[in-house]
Image (cartoon, rainbow, N blue to C red):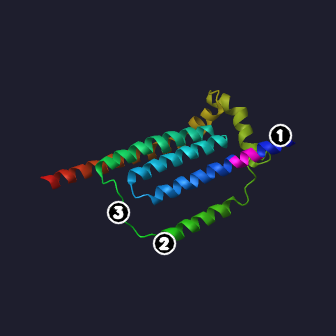
Amino acid sequence: MAVRRTKTMTTYTLDIILLFLLVISAVAAISVRSLLAASMFLAIYSLLMAQIWVHLQAVDVAFTEAAVGAGISTVLLVGTLVYIKADEVPAPLVHWPSLAAVMITGAVLIYGTLDMPPFGDPTAPTNLHVAPYYIAHSLEQTQVPNFVTSVLASYRGYDTLFETAVIFTAGISLILLLRQSSKHKRKKRS
C-alpha cells in the first residue's frame, strides 16, 4: 500500500512539474518580443507536451508531437523568420474579444469532460468495447501484428491521410507565402 501511495505521489508530482513548465513556456512564448525566441519557446512547449504524452502512455502521439510540433514546425517558423523581421510589431496588451473566445471555449471543453470516466478506468466504454475488438480482430483483418500501427494505418487510415494532407497544405501555403514575400522584396529593391 505504501509503495502504491509513493508511486501515486511521484506521478502527481511529475504531473504538476510538467504542467508548471508547460504554462511557463506558453506564457514565455506569448510574452517575448523576439519572434525567434517565441519560436524556441514553442519548440520547448512541444517537447514538454511530448513528455506528457509519454507519461500518459500515448507514445505514438508523443512521437507525432515531437516530430511535427518540435521538429517540422520549428524549422518552418525559423525558416520564415529568415524572410521577415525578427521583432514583433507592438500590439495591445489584451485583446478582449480573443480573451472572451478563449474563456468560452475553455469552459465548454471543461464542461464536456465532466462526465468522462477517470483516466485508466477499466470499466470505461473504450476498455469494454473498442479495445477488446481491436485486440481480437486486428491481426486477422489487417495482417499487422502491432495494434497501434494497425489502428493508425487501417482502422483510422482516413484520419491519418487527412492529417498528412493538412500538414502538406500548410507547407505548400507557407512556401507560396514566402515566394510572394521574396518577389515583393525584389520589386521594392528594383
**Amino acid type assigned to the residue bearing label 1 in the image:** Val
Callout 2 amino acid = Pro
**168 lies left or right of 188:** right
Is residue 82 left or right of 74 when viewed as pictured? left
Relative height, residue 181 to residue 55 (above, below): below
Residue under the point 48% across and 43% down: 70
- Give the residue at x 62% y 66%: 107
- Under circle 1, the secondary element is helix
Is any atom of residue 100 visible in this view?
Answer: yes
CB under 8 Å between discs 3 and 1 = no
Q: How far apart are marks 2 and 1 (CA)?
A: 49 Å
Instruction: Label 2, secondary structure: give it.
Output: helix
For the residues marked 2 and 3, what is the alpha-carbon distance in whole angstroms? 20 Å
Which residue position is annotated with label 3? 89
Q: Give the Cα distance between marks 3 and 1.
A: 53 Å
Magenta range is: 9-13
Q: Which amino acid does label 3 sit on?
A: Val
Q: Name the residue under label 1.
A: 3
Circle 3: element type: loop
Picture layout, residue 142 above or below residue 89: above
Disc 2 or disc 3, which is closer to the eye?
A: 3
> From the viewer's perspective, is 167 left or right of 182?
right
The residue at 57%/55% (across/down) is 23
